[in-house]
Image (cartoon, rainbow, N blue to C red):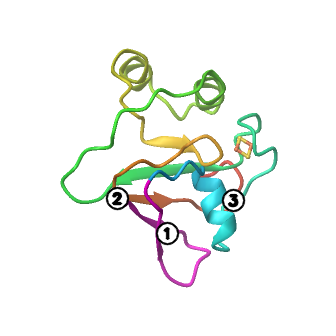
Amino acid sequence: MPNITFSAPIMKKDKTIYAVAGNTSTILALAKEHDIPIPFECGDGDCGSCLIEVTALGDKPLMGMALTEKEKARLKELQMISPAELEQAEVNDTPPRFRLACQFIPRDEDVLVSFTGTPGGS
Ligand code: FES
């Protein structure tokens, strides 16, 4: 059961939520459910406004997960994924540092999700 901690300069303090086992909600859906103000517009990987930075907490590395083609395209367009990170994502399913909250479904890992509160400005 993962702990997901949200942190942003626009929040009074960090907030940690516990995603239930087998959770299939995106970070954006979980944030909305818990009144965490991650900016968003399309909710579908098209606009890039929900950019977040994801850091593994604890000693477990982030679990592998294939990025959707939309997320890869948008992160490339925003210049928030390096060619090396893109290769790692495509070859080893190693997630990059920046993600789109509307595309990222947390797994069984504790993570810190940081965002600025400015659309597209993780
Ligand atoms: Fe548009 Fe996530 S809300 S890409």
At label 2, the amino acid type is: Asp
Q: Measured from the top left, where is residue 14 in percent x and y?
A: 47, 77
Q: CA distance from mark 1 to mark 2?
A: 14 Å
Please name the residue that numbered disc 3 is placed on. 118
Ligand 1 appears in which quadrant? top right
Of helix, strand and loop, which one carries label 2?
loop
Find the magenta span and give its range: 1-21
Q: Residue at x 44, y 50 (%)?
A: 54
Please name the residue that numbered disc 2 is placed on. 110
Q: Measured from the top left, where is residue 64 in percent x and y?
A: 36, 33
Please name the residue that numbered disc 1 is placed on. 7
| 117, 18: nearer the viewer | 18
Query: Residue 12 in magenta?
Result: yes
Q: Is residue 44 above or below residue 41?
A: above
* Circle nearer the N terminus (1, 2): 1
Quarter residue 35 falls in: bottom right
